[in-house]
Image (cartoon, rainbow, N blue to C red):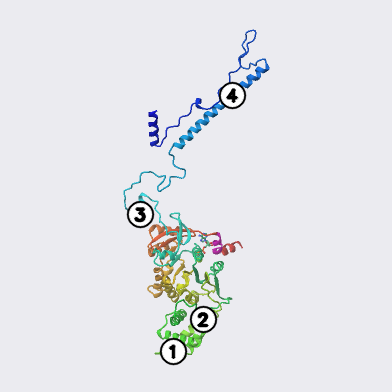
Amino acid sequence: MADRNRADREATVFGYPSPAPVPSLDALSVPPMPVPLPSLPIDDDGKVFAAPGYSPPQRRLRREAVKAARQVDRSHRQRLMALRKAEAEALRAEERRAAYLPKGGEPGSMAGRTYRRLKVVPHRVTSEVLAGAYPFLAEEGLGSEGALIGQDSWSGTAFCFDPWDLYRRGALTNPNIFLGGQIGRGKSTLAKSLATRYIAFGRRVYVPGDPKGEWSVVSRAVGGQVIELGVGATARLNPLDEGPRPSGLSDTACYAQVTSDRQALLAALATTTLGRPLRAVERTALDSALSTTVAGHSTPILPQVVDALHAPGNAVAGSTVAQLLVDGREVAHALARLVSGDLAGLFDGPSTVRFDPALPMLSLDLSRISGSDTLLGLIMTCTSAWMEAALRDPEGGQRLVVYDEAWRLMAQPALLARMQSHWKLSRAWGLANLMVVHRLSDLEAVGESGSEARGLAQGLLGDTATRILYNEPTDEAVSAGKVLGLSSTEVRQLPELARGEGLWRVNERAFVVRHLCTPGELALTDTNARMIEGARG
Ligand SMILES: Nc1ncnc2c1ncn2[C@@H]1O[C@H](COP(=O)(O)OP(=O)(O)O)[C@@H](O)[C@H]1O
Ligand SMILES: [Mg+2]
């Protein structure tokens, strides 16, 4: 008995309880075997009828024999069932006594794991060396803040991106984004997804120039405003509009700001139409014409400025009225293009549309304007000036400004200068500028080597912390690799990227991201529809 107790204890210590004793049949309350069969009758002639199949001749005896046989059978089954029941009960009792892990695991930290702590000697190596031993290293990602973009192709995790949040966390030095890639690879689709998904986070989106008119459907879908300019459109914008007044600005500061904006705009328009920088005396004549116009009209418009250039009112320091007339003549003729030339009717009167900065999205559809890139640049200069008053408002919240097909605008140094000031001021104004071009070398192709325009275009890239590259041909990938400092693996990957897949450089970190679209988004952004319908029809 003592030995048995010890064995039990030891078994329990090691976690294996000794099996529960199965009760003997005697201990079970099983009904005893029935009375023995009635003794068999012996025939007179001395024969014993005890063989199988024997049936006593008397009916009563036969019934008793059948009854007795049934009883034996029943009793046997009862004994068997009692035995099985006792065994099952013993098993259950054993299970109850055994220290099994609970089904849901043990509570507390490190539950269900080994009770010994894993001890590993710390060893520090670079990820490059470590990848030799363990090649499954992947970026930890940018976190789960902001809009979901798609799937990180290297790690398989979800990829979220929010330039404002990343800037706040110090992961980005500025919120601007560059997006480059061949035609039809999904650049605009990504830009539209970013726009619509950020709107869900309370941001607003401005598209100051949409040369293909492909943003209009998106803008309407999110409850935004579309302004159509060009042949057959009735909208007219006055680029000299004061615009919504930024909150917290005094009258004097506001007047100074509006004046300097108007001067900058007129100078940019004159520079673009003349195709050369303004001379100092021309600038003076232009500023003087502007102040004459503002003095005489509460809502100045371009034709009044052109008139004032043709007929200067007052002399200014260093220039007589006659000198102002001579100095401003060429500028007046250049600006006349917007008043009576091919751009007549677009910017030469008071605005017929109002810009509501509270709307989630505003896009300027320029698809009706066919012409040179200079023309487009000129129009974008006016439209971006018109929007700028709203962009400048520091209380305006976080906004995304999209320059789709920006390569068409790059040729205009005056517009580039405007864009650069937006890029520089993005952090102060809460803006994230998104520039979409075909390739990085579009920036290299701007102006002459060493020219101001080239410097401005490269400066834009310098002020852009997020660079997204879609599929590029090999030679373009190599030069992009040099400019952005891509690794050889990343350069090799660029020509192999599928549609909707891009290499994201977020500061110094790199991700290959598969942009995932919902069917609803694809319906809004499908730029192939016309191509396919055309082929069918
Ligand atoms: N991530 C994606 N998933 C599915 N289709 C896409 C994706 N990105 C782009 N597309 C499709 O590819 C076509 C071309 O895309 P688009 O954005 O207009 O190219 P890009 O602006 O680079 O010229 C569109 O019809 C769009 O529906
Ligand atoms: Mg596109």
Q: Secondary structure at mark 1?
A: helix
**Mark closer to the chain start, 4 or 2:** 4
Span of residues in magenta: 519-528
Find disc 2 in the rendering and name its residue: 338
Residue at the top extreme of this rendering: 45
In this rendering, the answer to whether 113 lies above or below 370 is above
Find disc 4 in the rendering and name its residue: 73
Task: Give the number of the disc on residue 127.
Answer: 3
Label 1 and label 3: CA atoms lie apart by: 68 Å
Circle 1/circle 2 CB separation < 8 Å: no
Circle 4/circle 2 CB separation < 8 Å: no
Label 3 and label 4: CA atoms lie apart by: 78 Å
Label 4 and label 2: CA atoms lie apart by: 115 Å
**Mark closer to the chain start, 1 or 3:** 3
The amino acid type of the residue labelled 4 equals: Asp
The amino acid type of the residue labelled 3 equals: Ser
Q: Nearer the viewer, mark 4 or mark 2?
A: 4
The amino acid type of the residue labelled 2 equals: Leu
- Front residue of this view, candidates 152 and 41: 41
Circle 3/circle 4 CB separation < 8 Å: no
| x and y, in percent, of residue 266 in the image | 46, 81
Find disc 1 in the rendering and name its residue: 324
Q: Secondary structure at mark 2?
A: helix
- Based on the displayed image, in which of its 4 quarters is residue 167 positioned? bottom left
Q: Nearer the viewer, mark 3 or mark 4?
A: 4
